[in-house]
Amino acid sequence: MRRICQLAIRSRNLQFGLAKRFASAEASSSEDNSTPPTLRPDLNFEFLLDDNNLNAIKENISHRKGVGDIDKVREKWAVIQKMMHKSSESTGKSSDGITESKYAQLWNELYDEALLIPNMTQDGVPRGGEENAKVVAEWGEKREDNCLAAEKLVQNWRSLLHPTEASGQRSYVFLGALASLEKALLDYAYERVCAIGFRPITIPDIVSGEVTQACGVTQTSDHPIQYSLGDDEPHTKLSGTAEMGIAAFLRGRKFQEEQLPIRLVSLSRCFRTEISKSASEAKLYRVHEFSKVEMFTVCTPEQSATELDFLVEVQKGTFQALGVHCRQLEMPSEELGASAARKFDIEAWMPGRKLYGEVSSASNCTDFQARRLGIKYKSADGTEKYAHTCNGTALASTRTLISVLETFQNDKKGLGELPEPIRNRIKQRGGPLRFQPAKSLA
């Protein structure tokens, strides 16, 4: 029986067909007729339940902030195996009175636990916390003199407002000069990525909780990290990044191998529930919403390492042209989230704050998201395989704005000459070329 079950677990009929049948039975049972049938993601149970992988999975979990419990996954599967062995299909009940509705509940519990298991960390990635991040590269002149923080610098510009009645203490409005500067930064990054060959896509900023979970966002009731639409639609979320909307668009799609890699770019709003950890992270540094240019690629397993490197090179080129001092970091295992197997961050120097702040990130998620979203491709020999996905921030508005303002400020509480890509865009739109104190909005 063990061999039969091991063979079955390699079959999509076990992971999809039986799960769908049990969920359908649950929906039609007298115990609960409100739950619709569920088609579950094709998680790699062959890998998760292989005894030979147990120690590696446990070690990986321990290096990823300890989220996930492979022992619970295996315990749930052992119970299901036992019930399958005892099941009497003629009566719809097992010999000890377990109904198909109970089977469905067990499958729910199995998947709930399995979904928490993080992606496997790639070889060579530093282990541990943020302090173990490895500096890979640095560029740009590092300004070390006494500078004002961005918010202090623009205080007299009458260009940064905080209408708390709009959305609380973290709301902000850019008016005039700052609005022009932010628009120029976003346009530059977006146009540059499109020129490199990424296909533009506009996606919803409202997505389902299933999609955010498939992207690797784990949310608990005592630690909400996403905004939901309230009691009426608790499973509908405000997107934290365009990655989620793009993932929703790609869900269930199949491609031909020759189509890959597919490279997409989107400009969207991002919504976060984060709170400041220090005074330096207050104001514009850590806000509840901002704009971001996001890159997303779908590729084959053989292409994903190269795609990650390509995303990082795009990011480096963008920030080199902006003239700010930056460093590139390879992030350690505890900073990868659930989905990434490898991740690089770019941090920009903010001389007014005297700190490096993350402005860009790029991740190789291998098949973690693709399995949960059903993103596949057909190889040259006709075999269907799961794709790999990578994503990367081209530019996030508020933190990039901070770094530019603090780097290019002059002693007259204005800005000196900005980098050409930004200066030209502001000029083309009739914006101010010199950022100095302005008249009030009247």
Image (cartoon, rainbow, N blue to C red):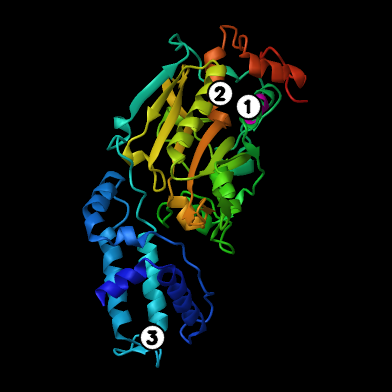
Work out whether 130 lies above or below 45: above
Q: Nearer the viewer, residue 397 or 60?
A: 60
- Name the residue rendered at 69%, 24% in the picture: 180
Residue to which mark 3 is pinned? 99
What amino acid is labelled 3 in the image? Thr
State the predominant SS element of the stretch in magenta: helix
Task: Tell whether label 1 touches label 3 (CB within 8 Å).
Answer: no
Left or right: 367 with respect to 294? left
Task: Tell whether label 1 touches label 2 (CB within 8 Å).
Answer: yes
Residue 213 in view (yes/no): no
The secondary element bearing badge 2 is classed as: helix
The image quadrant of residue 293 is top right
Work out whether 114 lies above or below 8: above
Residue to which mark 1 is pinned? 192
What is the spatial separation of the Cα atoms under label 3 and label 2, in whole angstroms? Answer: 59 Å
Left or right: 442 with respect to 229? right
Quadrant housing the C terminus:
top right
Residue 194 in view (yes/no): yes
The image quadrant of residue 123 is top left
What amino acid is labelled 1 in the image? Arg
Quadrant housing the N terminus:
bottom left
Q: Position of residue 431 (x, y in %)?
A: 74, 19
Q: Position of residue 142 (x, y in %)?
A: 44, 12
Q: Position of residue 80 (x, y in %)?
A: 32, 75
Residue to which mark 2 is pinned? 318
Earlier-in-chain disc, 3 versus 2: 3
Mark 3, other Cα within 10 Å: few <14 / some 14–19 / many ≥20: many
Earlier-in-chain disc, 2 versus 1: 1
Earlier-in-chain disc, 3 versus 1: 3
Residue 187 within the segment the image draws in magenta = yes
**Residues rendered magenta in the picture:** 183-190
